[in-house]
């Protein structure tokens, strides 16, 4: 049990640092009401998690990479907070675009990653 906690924690540390770095990098390069950084990390994470799941990897990689790294990299709570903020600001077009892009492409990319993972031999 302890080793599983270490795997998730170590992966979570890496994922959180990656998320912060990516968010800072994208934030400095975009000036948009659309939360591009959160959208990017969530879509990237959806694809990679689908891929990892499709690969049917060992518990080590699921805990470290899936639960740890990708769990910390992606962020449903920030997505929801940013959506609520767009709603309260009555920025309807961006709110709808953000929601549709996040759900549609998130599910599509997770499915695509899963399918691709099934074709790659372990």
Image: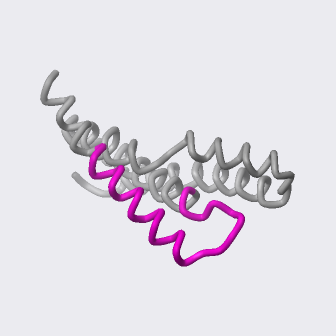
Looking at the image, residue 37 sits to the left or right of residue 6; the answer is right
Indicate left or right for 120 with 22 as reference: left
Magenta portion: prevailing SS class: helix
Per the image, is 26 magenta? yes
- Number of numbered markers: 0
Q: Pick the residue in front: 114 or 27.
A: 27
Residue 121 vertical position relative to residue 76 in the rendered view, above or below: below
Residue that lies at the very extreme toward the left in this rendered image? 3
At which x and y percent is residue 21? 38, 64
Please name the residue shown 73% across and 53% down the image.
100
Q: Nearer the viewer, residue 54 or 29?
A: 29
Compared with 66, 20 (above or below) is below
User: Toward which corner of the image does residue 98 lie, by quadrant?
Assistant: bottom right
Residue 33 among magenta residues: yes
Q: Residue at x 45, y 71 (%)?
A: 25
Q: Quadrant of the N terminus?
A: top left
- What span is in magenta? 12-38
Residue occupying the point 39% across, 45% down? 72
Give the image's coloring scheme: one colour
Percent x, y for residue 61? Answer: 23, 43
Q: Residue furthest bottom?
A: 29
Horizontal arrangement in the rendering, residue 61 relative to residue 109 (left or right): left
| Left or right position of 46 against 91 | left
From the top left corner, tell me how far across and down residue 75 is, in percent.
Answer: 50, 45
């Amino acid at each position: 049990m302890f080793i599983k906690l270490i795997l998730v924690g170590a992966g979570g540390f890496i994922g959180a640092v990656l998320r912060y770095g990516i968010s800072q990098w994208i934030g400095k390069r975009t000036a948009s009401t659309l939360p591009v950084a959160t959208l990017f990390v969530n879509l990237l994470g959806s694809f990679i998690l689908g891929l990892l799941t499709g690969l049917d990897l060992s518990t080590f990689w699921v805990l470290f990479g899936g639960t740890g790294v990708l769990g910390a990299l992606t962020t449903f709570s920030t997505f929801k907070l940013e959506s609520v903020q767009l709603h309260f600001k009555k920025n309807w077009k961006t709110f709808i675009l953000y929601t549709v892009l996040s759900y549609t492409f998130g599910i599509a990319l997770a499915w695509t990653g899963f399918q691709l993972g099934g074709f790659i031999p372990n």
